[in-house]
């Protein structure tokens, strides 16, 4: 009888002992997840503030390209990079990349919402995928993130874009952009590109040379000043014409939004995006 009573008591007590253990494990797991997320968030803030003063020693794209060169046959391993101050980069190149890549660079706060909306519509129609990326977005992507297409990466790109707009300012964004952007296979930054293609410092870039480098940017592995196709020459002329139209970009000047035009923010786009998704689901 006593043995039966003890076994019953043990059976009754066992659930009470195991439940706290499960709760304790879940608490520890949640604590690890929370601490991990908090650590990543703090690390991202640290990197943003660090890169405000120091150019990234390596970027995810540089590592990716190096691995491609290393493991692909008949592809030479090449790594050319030489960081310089924005004061040692020709204003012609600043004008060229703004004219070619982001005409409203000095006026927007990181995002061209109208372009993002247009990209969304065209992508939904199944047309060629457009990014609608500004120079700020390209800088954030190149400095912090791998070049993979996913919603998570786009969300992180928006996060880092907003962070560098708040903390760096336009001049630093342009400086970092022109120092890490890819101008050819294994060629990174304005100084390395200028030396490679033209044999002189990027401080001496002419308007035509600057336009050539700007034309390279959308697809640096396929087109560059080393292979001047008829299309490349045509686009160089287009960029030079835009440079003359836009005039010199003053990175120290604070531009005001155009009168009568309310600038939409990334938060406006997110709201609009979810509204469109709801409409599409109802169709």
Image (cartoon, rainbow, N blue to C red):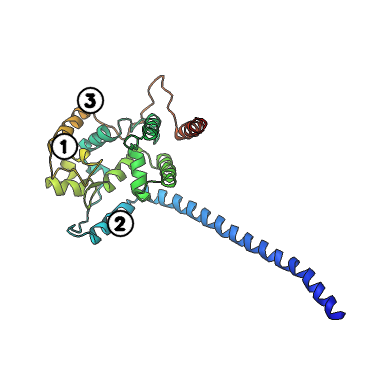
The mark that comes first in sequence, 3 or 1, is 1
The mark that comes first in sequence, 2 or 3, is 2
Classify residue 250 by image quadrant: top left
Q: SS at mark 3?
A: helix
Residue nearest the viewer, comparing 10 with 79: 10
Q: Could you tell me residue 150's position as x and y percent?
A: 41, 46
Q: SS at mark 1?
A: helix
| Residue at the far right in the pictured view | 1
Which residue is at a point 70% across and 67% down the rendered structure image? Answer: 18
Which mark is in front, 2 or 3? Answer: 2
| Residue at the far top in the pictured view | 260
Classify residue 94 by image quadrant: top left
Q: Is residue 179 above or below residue 93?
A: below
Q: SS at mark 2?
A: helix
Q: Could you tell me residue 31's position as x and y percent?
A: 59, 58
Classify residue 202 by image quadrant: top left
Measured in 3D between alpha carbons, the distance from the residue under mark 2 to the one under mark 3, in whole angstroms, is 38 Å
Residue underneath mark 3:
245
Residue nearest the viewer, comparing 243 with 33: 33
Which residue is at a point 13% across and 44% down the rendered structure image? Answer: 227
Measured in 3D between alpha carbons, the distance from the residue under mark 3 to the one under mark 1, in whole angstroms, is 20 Å
Within 10 Å of disc 3 (Cα), the crowding (few <14, some 14-19, many 20+) is few
Res. 63 mark: 2
Measured in 3D between alpha carbons, the distance from the residue under mark 2 to the one under mark 1, in whole angstroms, is 28 Å
Q: Could you tell me residue 179's position as x and y percent?
A: 27, 47
Within 10 Å of disc 2 (Cα), the crowding (few <14, some 14-19, many 20+) is few
The answer to whether the residues at label 2 and label 1 have Cβ atoms under 8 Å apart is no
Residue underneath mark 1:
232
Give left or right: position of 127 versus 91: right
Give left or right: position of 127 versus 238: right
Q: Could you tell me residue 204's position as x and y percent?
A: 15, 41
């Amino acid at each position: 009888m006593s043995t039966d009573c003890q076994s019953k008591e043990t059976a009754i007590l066992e659930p009470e002992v195991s439940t706290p253990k499960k709760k304790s494990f879940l608490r520890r797991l949640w604590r690890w997840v929370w601490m991990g997320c908090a650590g990543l968030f703090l690390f991202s803030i640290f990197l943003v503030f660090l890169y405000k003063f120091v150019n990234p020693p390596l970027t995810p794209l540089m590592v990716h390209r190096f691995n491609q060169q290393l493991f692909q046959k008949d592809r030479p391993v090449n790594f050319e990079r030489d960081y310089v101050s924005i004061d040692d980069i020709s204003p012609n190149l600043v004008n060229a990349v703004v004219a070619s890549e982001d005409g409203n660079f000095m006026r927007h706060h990181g995002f061209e919402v109208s372009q993002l909306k247009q990209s969304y519509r065209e992508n939904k129609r199944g047309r060629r995928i457009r990014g609608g990326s500004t120079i700020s977005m390209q800088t954030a992507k190149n400095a912090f993130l791998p070049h993979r297409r996913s919603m998570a990466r786009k969300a992180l790109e928006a996060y880092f874009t907003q962070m560098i707009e708040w903390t760096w300012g336009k001049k630093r964004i342009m400086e970092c952009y022109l120092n890490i952007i890819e101008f050819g296979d294994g060629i990174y930054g304005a100084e390395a590109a200028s030396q490679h293609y033209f044999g002189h410092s990027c401080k001496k870039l002419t308007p035509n040379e600057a336009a050539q480098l700007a034309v390279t940017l959308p697809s640096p592995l396929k087109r560059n000043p080393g292979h001047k196709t008829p299309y490349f020459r045509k686009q160089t002329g287009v960029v030079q014409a835009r440079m003359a139209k836009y005039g010199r970009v003053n990175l120290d000047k604070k531009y005001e939004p155009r009168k009568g035009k309310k600038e939409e923010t990334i938060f406006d786009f997110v709201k609009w995006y979810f509204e469109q998704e709801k409409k599409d689901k109802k169709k």
